[in-house]
Amino acid sequence: MSEPSTPSIERVPRPGPRPLPPRVSVFTRPFWDALAGGRLISTRCRQCGRVSFPPKPLCRSCWSEDIEWVDLPSTGVLYSFTRVHVVPRAFLADALYDIGIVDLPNGVRLMCRLLDAEPDTDIGSSVRMVSAIYEDGPLFAARVRPGPAASSPSLAKDVP
């Protein structure tokens, strides 16, 4: 994985600690360190080329342990989203927040916090991935981008 000269995703300051901090292991440390620096990375199998998200030490396609860390695309398409009104206690300070499912151009589909979604946000909207920087560390999120929606292979197959 080559080091980019500038961060590949925007770093967005967020108040307070993360509502539910992730478990960081020896294996996932590169992911969290990259995210803190403004890069979204995951693992790719060197044998079959499959990209996994979240990062995995074993390919879920061919079971190879020969994996490498790669940068993920910084933009995607909103596959689905919902506004959360009733929240678990850990998320009370964030009540009324949006969760989205994002399709990245490399075939990865991920779920994350959706920032700046408006009531008229449409499925198929373009999003850009961001690193939400809390007092105690980062979380990945997506931000709705203004402008025309990008094409999404997953959306195209769902249209009759």
Image: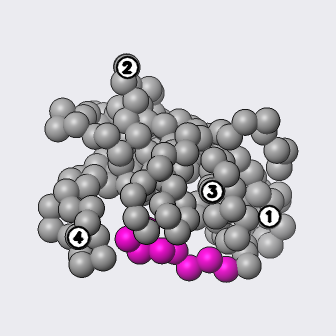
> Left or right: 33 with respect to 22?
right
Q: Which residue is mark 3?
A: 36
Seen at 30% across and 76% down, the residue is 90
Whether tag 2 and tag 1 are in contact, CB under 8 A, the answer is: no
Is disc 4 surrounded by few (<14), some (14 to 19) or many (20+) residues within 10 Å?
A: few
2 vs 3, front mark = 3
Seen at 52% across and 74% down, the residue is 22
Q: CA distance from mark 1 to mark 4?
A: 38 Å
Q: Earlier in the sequence, mark 2 or mark 3?
A: 3
Q: CA distance from mark 4 to mark 2?
A: 34 Å
Whether tag 1 and tag 4 are in contact, CB under 8 A, the answer is: no
Q: Earlier in the sequence, mark 4 or mark 2?
A: 4
Q: Where are the magenta residues, as a range?
A: 18-25
Seen at 55% across and 45% down, the residue is 11
Q: Which residue is mark 4?
A: 92
Residue type, numbered disc 3: Ala
Residue type, numbered disc 2: Pro
Q: Earlier in the sequence, mark 2 or mark 1?
A: 1
Q: CA distance from mark 1 to mark 3?
A: 22 Å
Q: Earlier in the sequence, mark 1 or mark 3?
A: 3
- Label drawn at residue 67: 1
Residue 131: % across, % down: 53, 50
In this orientation, which residue lies closer to the viewer: 51 or 132?
132
Q: Which residue is mark 2?
A: 148
Residue 37: % across, % down: 67, 51
Give the farthest residue toward the top. Answer: 148
- Does 73 appear in magenta? no
Q: CA distance from mark 2 to mark 1?
A: 36 Å
Label 3: element kind: helix
Label 1: element kind: strand
